[in-house]
Image (cartoon, rainbow, N blue to C red):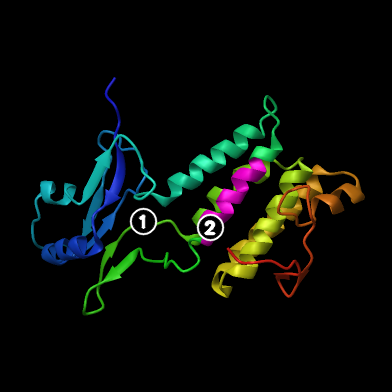
């Protein structure tokens, strides 16, 4: 059975923009980094073009290979960390401490995105004409990847719920306001998961405490910032 290739990198936007202008139309890239390429799958679509650009020229704008890499696909590192966490939370292993340690790393990865401009998928030429649309992961995509499966698999773990509450609180305190709505959405989903998973009101309250160790030292916040003294890393 032949090995399927994945998209490792989409060429630089200036190069694709140049090709779109040569074609006289708008180009939409139909695959994203990390996608597995299946035989016959369309890769790009040209709208309104009036000049022919050879297929081989278009294909050279995509770099493919057997393996995803961290530098080419930032989602891949998060994917591996999430896999570690949900495997640790499986009934066969039942190791919430490892899941909490994975959440430490996930928080670090998400904080590294704080100054990154992620809304870069639509590119216009010098005249303001939309020439290129490239799928890129948004802030919401990164959060869904980092949170959804862990919150589902760890919904009955007080340790995991507390760590996730602290993670979201830390991100809200550290990140600019435009990143907050998606974080507030995930905090509400986390609260809903806690409400479903714990029948006793006292257990719900315990699971809702922010604690970076899961079961360690509870955080006390004022205005979105922690009271705990300490040095920044």
User: Of tags 1 and 2, which is closer to the observer?
Assistant: 2
**Viewer-nearest residue: 16 or 206:** 206
* 39 shown above or below 176: above
Name the N-terminal-most of marks 1 and 2.
2
The answer to whether the residue labelled 1 contacts the one labelled 2, judged by CB atoms less than 8 Å apart, is no
* 131 shown above or below 136: below
- Mark-to-mark CA distance, 1 and 2: 19 Å
Could you tell me which residue is drawn at 10 percent across and 55 percent down?
53
Callout 1: few (<14), some (14-19), or many (20+) C-alpha neighbours within 10 Å? some
Residue 207: x and y in percent read: 80, 50
Q: Secondary structure at mark 1?
A: loop
**Residue position marked by numbered label 1 in the rendering:** 135
Residue 88: x and y in percent read: 64, 33
Q: Quadrant of the C terminus?
A: bottom right
* 148 shown above or below 88: below
Q: Secondary structure at mark 2?
A: helix
Q: Is residue 153 visible?
A: no
**Residue position marked by numbered label 2 in the rendering:** 110
Is 13 one of the magenta-colored residues? no
Q: In the drawing, does residue 82 fall left or right of residue 152?
A: left
Q: Quadrant of residue 89?
A: top right
Query: Which stretch appears magenta?
Result: 99-111
* 176 shown above or below 58: below
Residue 95's label in the rendered image is: none
Q: Quadrant of residue 176?
A: bottom right
Q: Quadrant of residue 175?
A: bottom right
Could you tell me which residue is drawn at 71 percent across and 71 percent down?
224
């Amino acid at each position: 059975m032949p090995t399927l290739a994945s998209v490792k990198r989409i060429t630089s936007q200036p190069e694709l923009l140049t090709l779109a202008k040569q074609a006289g139309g708008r180009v939409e890239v139909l695959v994203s980094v990390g996608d597995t390429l299946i035989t016959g799958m369309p890769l790009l679509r040209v709208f309104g073009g009036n000049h022919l650009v050879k297929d081989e020229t278009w294909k050279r704008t995509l770099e493919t290979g057997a393996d995803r890499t961290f530098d080419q696909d930032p989602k891949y590192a998060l994917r591996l960390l999430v896999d570690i966490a949900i495997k640790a939370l499986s009934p066969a292993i039942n190791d919430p401490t490892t899941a909490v340690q994975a959440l430490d790393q996930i928080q670090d990865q998400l904080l590294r995105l704080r100054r990154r401009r992620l809304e870069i998928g639509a590119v216009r030429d010098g005249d303001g004409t939309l020439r290129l649309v490239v799928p890129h992961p948004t802030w919401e995509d990164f959060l869904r990847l980092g949170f959804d499966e862990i919150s589902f698999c760890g919904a009955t773990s007080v340790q995991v719920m507390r760590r996730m509450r602290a993670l979201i609180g830390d991100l809200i305190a550290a990140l600019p306001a435009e990143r907050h709505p998606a974080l507030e959405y995930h905090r509400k989903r986390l609260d809903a998961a806690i409400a479903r998973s714990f029948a006793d009101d006292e257990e719900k309250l315990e699971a809702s405490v922010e604690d970076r160790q899961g079961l360690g030292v509870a955080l006390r916040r004022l205005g979105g910032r922690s009271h705990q003294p300490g040095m920044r890393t």
